[in-house]
Amino acid sequence: MTQDQLKQAVAQAAIDFILPKLDDKSIIGVGTGSTANFFIDLLAQHKMAFDGAVASSEATAQRLKGHGIPVYDLNSVSDLEFYVDGADESNERLELIKGGGAALTREKIVAAVAKTFICIADESKLVPILGAFPLPVEVIPMARSHVARQLVKLGGDPVYREGVLTDNGNIILDVYNLQIDSPAKLEEQINNIVGVVTNGLFAQRPANLLLLGTKDGVKSIK
Ligand code: 5RP
């Protein structure tokens, strides 16, 4: 199976998981990236089964609207049962690195509101220790050099993601060479640096369910 077929399979597994639990008032949190795009395209076939969606990025909002799925502002939504999104890495505890698509801050906000965060990923994303994928950090532009110096003190090698502005108007530093033994602690340490908006570690709020696409089928990890 190709990587895209694995992504398609986990997107379908997420649909199969949430569909019986939806009603016409349900609003679904939707993530960003190529795996989330497969999910959006499949979700569009079930428009009558739910009310609408909250998007974790402008790109996702555009894709949802393109399918005729109503997109709500998170501030107008009190109840979000499910958030479905991809990841750049996951460990067995469902702690994640996200933000390869620069949408980490809105993704983390929607994940914080959702009762159940379902991560969908192909098997290449499951790792024993987080950190081979460079950790994205969203930073207020004027704080770029200050934050980079603090990240070096934490043992990382930050690289400015050239030409990228987030949906919030900020820049991304990708931090290489971090061996992340205590993800929740590092998440907090990086978030405490003045000028950091947030970082791509999802450890304080990990996923609740990982649907992992493997060549032997979709595995469910809780
Ligand atoms: C975007 C993300 C994505 O979920 C992550 O980059 C995975 O993307 P893909 O499904 O394309 O591999 O965090 O900010």
Image (tube, rainbow, N blue to C red):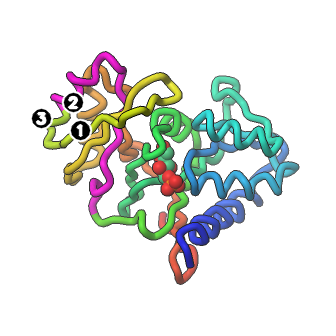
Which residue does the numbered mark 2 point to in the structure image? 148
Query: Of the residues tagged 3 and 1, which is closer to the observer?
Result: 1
Taking the spot 63% from the left edge, 48% from the top edge, the residue there is: 82
Rendered-image quadrant of the N terminus: bottom right
Q: Is residue 56 left or right of residue 108?
A: right
Q: Is residue 25 above or below residue 10?
A: above
State the separation of the CA atoms marked 3 and 2: 9 Å
Indicate the amino acid at tag 1. Answer: Pro
Residue at the disc numbered 3: 153
Q: Which residue is mark 1?
A: 158
| Residue 31 x, y percent position in the rendering | 58, 45
Q: Earlier in the sequence, mark 3 or mark 1?
A: 3
Task: Please name the amino acid that badge 3 sits on.
Answer: Lys
The answer as to whether callout 1 falls within 8 Å of ligand 1 is no
Report x, y in % for residue 127.
34, 65
Q: What stretch of residues is rendered in magenta?
A: 129-150
**Residue 128 falls in image quadrant:** bottom left
Contact flag, marks 1 and 2 (Cβ < 8 Å):
yes
